[in-house]
Image (cartoon, helix red, strand yellow):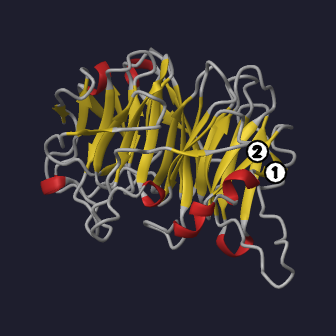
Amino acid sequence: MAGSLLVATRKGLFTGIEGTEGHWCFGPPAFLGEPVSAVLRDPRDGALYAALRLGHFGVKLHRSADDGETWTELPAPAFPPEPDAGEKAPAVDMIWTLAAGGADEPGLLWAGTLPAALFRSTDRGESWTRIDSLWTVSERAQWFGGGYDHPGLHSILVDPRDSRRLTVGISCGGVWLSEDAGATWVLGGAGLRADYMPPGRTDDRAIQDPHRLAHCAAAPDVIWCQHHNGLFRSTDRGASFTTIAPPAPSGFGFAAVAHPADPATAWFVPAVKDECRVPVDGRLVVTRTRDAAASFETLGTGLPGEGAYDLIYRHAMDVDATGERLAMGSTTGNLWIGEAGGAHWRLVSAHLPPIAQVAFVRS
């Protein structure tokens, strides 16, 4: 089964092409030496987007119409001037995620940023508008950073049945839902728990830290949440969540992947939490449920069984359209392909830069 994989890293954007006998070839990267924070292949028109985080030189955004042979620089999302002339507008530090609009919205793109904001483009990234209805919610005053100094918006789910229905995840700012393409918002996330907060605030929905939200494309009301305090599952598009008993070896992690057709199946990558953030006991594994979290399997065949310090970031695991093949990249530049739903894994590169995102190319 031939495939193509996009790998966003600290030193450029790599494209992997599967050859004979499962061999993967990675050519010279686009944007060599530059941190690529997010990548998107738009399934509606095939356009490829890459976001760069260049520090002193700011955030950049590029689009390719020829599978990365050539690139056009686009305006990056930027905060508008503050109404109060005495208040300096913040700067976008990173584009954390890019998402395509619905099939009925050609040219519409979404971007989630650090600091936490949602931006929309209706012209294939030629211009961007901040969604002020989310920026101005009163709860924003309570948001704070998790791994970063500022809160960040990292998960954008567009309902394939109705593209006006959005669910977004913010660390640490909770889960937010819109029924009208972002004109208005409701704070979801009932049932999430933040044990890092003082007593009495653990259930506060406005300060939850959902590390990653992933929905089943065939049943988008089902959302899996990898949270700072474990795993949760929603059956009402993120309005409320049910706690999942922590699977061995840990319920902590960052990545969450939902099966595209089976709402009972999802994958996670456990780790030691908080200041460590490494595999438990040095053994890298993937946990999988196929019965809506009633039980979990620990999948480690082909993955390092000892001495591993690989961390898998939020967007650094993906599943293909069949639901049978996965890809996973780590902070140490290792890249694996998982076959048979992750039952066995194969290292396809051990020398890439730290990996921020992997994405199968879908038509």
Residue at coordinates 77% horizontally, 64% vertically from top-left? 79
Point out residue 109 in the picture as x, y percentages from the top left corner. 74, 38
The residue beneath circle 2 is 120
Place residue 158 in its image quadrant: top right
On residue 289, the disc is none
Considering depth in this image, is 31 or 140 the residue closer to the camera?
A: 140
Q: Amino acid at mark 1?
A: Thr
The CA span between labels 2 and 1 is: 5 Å
Q: Secondary structure at mark 1?
A: strand
Point out residue 288 in the picture as x, y percentages from the top left corner. 25, 30
Point out residue 356 in the picture as x, y percentages from the top left corner. 49, 51
The residue beneath circle 1 is 129
Q: Amino acid at mark 2?
A: Arg
Going from N to C along the chain, the mark reached first, 2 or 1, is: 2
Relative vertical location of residue 317 with respect to residue 83 in this rendering, above or below: above
Q: Residues within 10 Å of mark 2 (few under 14, many from 20)?
A: many
Q: Residues within 10 Å of mark 1 (few under 14, many from 20)?
A: some
Considering depth in this image, is 7 or 138 the residue closer to the camera?
A: 138
Residue at coordinates 30% horizontally, 65% vertically from top-left? 200
Tell me whether the residue at label 2 lies in contact with that at label 1, contact meaning CB atoms closer than 8 angstroms: yes
The residue lying furthest to the front in this view is: 200
Residue 349 visible somewhere in the drawing: no
Place residue 191 in its image quadrant: top left
